[in-house]
Structures are given as structure tokens and as C-alpha cells.
Amino acid sequence: MAKITAVIDIGSNSARMVIYEKTSRFAFHLIHEVKSRVRLPENAYQNGGNLQNQAMQRTYDALENFLHIAASYKARKILCVATSALRDAPNKNEFLSQVKNGLGLNIKVIDGQKEAHYGAIACCNLLPKSDALTIDIGGGSTEFSYIIDGKVTNTLSLELGTVRLKELYFDKGDIEGARDYINKELDKLNDIPTSSLMGIGGTFRALSNAIMKDIKYPLSKLHAFEFSTKTMSIFIDKVMDANEKGLRRLYIKADRYDVIKPGSLIISELLKRKSDISKLITSGVGVREGVYLSDLLRHQKELFPVNFNPSVRYLLDSYITDANHSNQMAKVAREIFELTASTYNIDEKYKRDLVIAAKLSPIGSMLHNYSSNQHSYYLIQTALEYGFTHKEIMLIATLTKFAKRRAPSSAHFDEYKNILPDETIAEFLSFIISLSSALLTHRPRNLSYEFSFDKNCLHVSTQENIYLVKESVKNLQFPKGIKVEFI
Ligand code: LMR
Ligand code: MG
């Protein structure tokens, strides 16, 4: 697959383009994102689905600009899909040939099953692993699928969309008509028990973003934001009752004012039926990432290899210059954890996060040596995007932030309470990272340490000259009840 790839999704409310850079076989990161609220099916639903000239021209202009941006990044491959607006339009060929002839762009119009599938494989690969129902609310259609044991099943596409409902019902003040129509469509959804809902698309993102602001959520990251059904239902009730001023106070952006209610109504009617769902997970990824992944992972049954994480690999590919040192950090941290964790009642589940933090802790020094821990922290907090919960991201970032001598500050815990583990746990894990780093001060070519643990004392033995190591370890801030001795 090309190093730089652009993916365009012509949705019915907005058209979006993402540009990805591949950093190794399966690792990639987002280098550009752009959207335009083209609203391609505007005034189409009342006209047999026929696209209107103004809307087609807007979309054409946006695509022309998108291609210009893609060229500036030297994108070698451009994948472009279109969903319900074009799928449903009797005059779609007019638009498709305009774009083909004028811009040289091939638009692939995908059917509802494919659309549901793309959204689902994006969630399945790029959100923390969990069984879930996925929902992708678009302007013209809404897609569902179930993720069960890491596999996508029961994909379904319904003719429910925010722009569609707005034009057919809301504009006429017929909210009850919209509600009936939504429920008639939702009758087609298979009811498979699941406790989580993964939400894709502009509506779900806009509501999640507003809720995060409303509750003063401390981490500025939409993807993998988790919240309760109750929080969503209460918020939707407020949205449904609000006028434009009210919507602004509820942190809804102006370009969503006219479609947020139709979208919210779809969610609330779904949640009423699926009372088994208690947890909502926001997806920052959707059809575009699905299209990309299905190409990237075409020989992999559309799944990453086991234990592979694209964000961790991207960070390692881009910011680790001494892979040996990073691997040694991981190895030493793992060994110390395995010897000591049970004594201090640290749950086994933290081992994975600790090892990743150890491995990634040197990344900040690639940016600049001074404040390197701060750089690692910031990079991890922002770029550890895929496959982790916010709790895991914050723990890993925190462990690297305080990876030198100091234990995490209580101000830090105050700021991120609810998304960090207990202070004593974080302190202990942070100590392991600092200790591992201190034990590698002399940058050994090969590791020759032998560790043993007995009566709250970690014994470290080696034949090497570890003069600087001893000095660094002495300067560490030790948690209560643990000692290190060199023998
Ligand atoms: C879509 O139709 O998929 C998107 O345009 C959704 C949105 O609300 O922006
Ligand atoms: Mg869509």
C-alpha cells in the first residue's frame, strides 16, 4: 500500500477526507483531516431522491479542493466512497461523470451493507476490544452491526438519516411522524443482547463532544470516550427541548443546529428499545478508516495481527532511535513487575500498560533532550489514539511523565481523577519505570542484570561497571516499604 493515502467519504451531511501516512507494514497515523458540510442530498428527499444542481456544485467544489490538498501531501493513492446520497439518487450518473471527467476522480458508491461493514471494522480494529452494537448515524442512512468476539456480524442499513428526517418531518414540525418512522425502521434491527453501543458519525461525535464539555471531562480526546446511557439520555432530553440559543449553551456547533435533533431522536429511540445497553463508546473512526483498513489488512482477514497496536507501532517507528534501549526498558520493567507486583497488591492487568509505558518512555527525547519526559507525556496523550481506553492512555502517559525520580504529583491526580488508577498504584508503577530507567543509565549493550526479590528488597546483581547506575538509583524517590540493593 502507498506510503501516503487519502480517503474521501462523501456523506449526506458532510464530505470528509483523511490522509494517512504509513510508517511500517501495518502502522499508520493521521496527517491531515478536512471536512465540508456539502449536504449533497439537500432538497432531494422531496424530489424523488434527485440531487439538485446547487448541492452537486458545492460537493464538486469541495472535492476539487480536497484533491488539491491530497496532492500537496503527495498522496499516491486516493480512495473515494459515497454513501446514501448517491446510492439513492436516480440522477447519480450525472454527478459521477462530472466528477470523473472534471476531476479525474472515481467515486465508488457503496451499498448499505458495505457501509455498515466499513464502520464496524474500523471500530473493531481501532477501539478497545469489546462486544458491542455499532451505530453510524449519517445524513441519509443509519448503519448497524454487532461486534461479537472480535467479529463483525448482522450488518444492517436503514433509511434513517439526519438530513432525511429533517426535510421529511422536522421542517414540517412533525416530530411524532419522525418518531413513528424511526421506530418502523428500527423494527428491522436484530435484537442481540449486548451492553455497549459504539457510536460513529457526525451526530454521535457532536453529542459526545458537547457532553465532554458539559461535564468538564479532563482529557481532550473524543475517540474511545466512554459514558453512560443515562448521561446520554438526559443530555438528549435537553437538546430536544432547546432552541438555537439553548443549543449553543449545550455546546452544539452552529453547523449542527438543524440536524442535531433528528440525530438525537434516532439515538434516544434506539436506547429505549435496547435497555440492555448501559455503556456508550464514542468512535472517532468510521467509514473512512474502514475503507483504509480493508485495503491495508486485505491479506489479514481485515484484522491486525494479535497483540499488534498501530498507534504504539507508529510511535516506535517515528520516535525511537535506539530500539535496543527501548526494548531493554520494557524487559527490565516487566521483570521487576513480575517479581514485586503481588507483594504490593498490584493487579496483573497493569503489566501491559507498564510495559508499553517503559517501551515508549524514551520517545520524548527525540523531540528534545530537555523536558523529554514532558514531550513523551504529551505525545502519548495525543497520539496513542487507537485500541486503548482513556484510562489506559492516561496511565501510560502519566508513567512516562514522571519517569525520572519524582512520583506523580497529587495535582496531576486531582486533574485526571476518574481516569487514573488509585494514587498508590500509579506511584508504584511509576517507580518501576524510574527504576528501570536508572538501571539503564550506563546504556549497556546487552542486559546482564539478575534480579531477586525478598522481604521487600529487590536485589540486583551484575558484573558490569554500574557506577552511574548506583548514583541514579540512590536519587530515586522510593515508595514506602521497598528497597533496592546491589549485590
Ligand atoms: C454522513 O452522512 O455520514 C455524515 O455526513 C454524517 C454527519 O452527520 O456529518
Ligand atoms: Mg456516513
Image (cartoon, grey):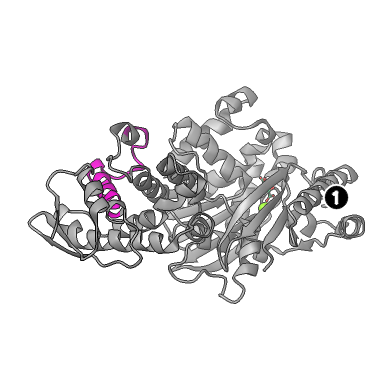
In the rendered image, the quadrant that contains the N terminus is: bottom right
Image location (x, y in percent) of residue 49 = 82, 52
Residue drawn 71% across and 44% down?
A: 35
Residue at the extreme left: 455
Is 455 left, or right, of 139 in this rendering?
left
Tally of numbered discs: 1
Residues in magenta, as a range: 414-436
Q: Nearer the viewer, residue 39 or 391?
A: 391
- The percent coordinates of residue 141 (x first, y second) are 68, 53
Residue for badge 1? 51
**Image x and y of residue 301, in percent:** 56, 75
422 on left or right of 482: right
> Is the shortest distance between ligand 1 and the CB of mark 1 under 8 Å?
no
Residue 189 in sight in this render: no
Q: Residue at point 32% right, 64% down?
A: 331
Q: Percent position (x, y) of residue 145?
A: 55, 62
In this orientation, does residue 90 appear?
A: yes
Inspect the magenta stretch and tell me whether residue 340 lies in it.
no
Left/right placement of residue 84 relative to residue 420 reads: right
Picture quarter with the C terminus: bottom left
Which is nearer the eye, 144 or 65?
Answer: 65
Q: Nearer the viewer, residue 372 or 346?
A: 372
Rendered view: 194 above or below 245 = below
- Residue 360 in which image quadrant: bottom left
Residue 415 is a magenta residue: yes
Residue ID at (36%, 55%): 358
Helix, strand or loop at mark 1: loop
Q: Amino acid at mark 1?
A: Leu
Mark 1 surroundings within 10 Å by alpha-carbon count, few (fewer than 14), some (14 through 19), many (20 or more): many
Dividing the picture into quadrants, the one containing residue 341 is bottom left
**Chief secondary structure of the magenta portion:** helix
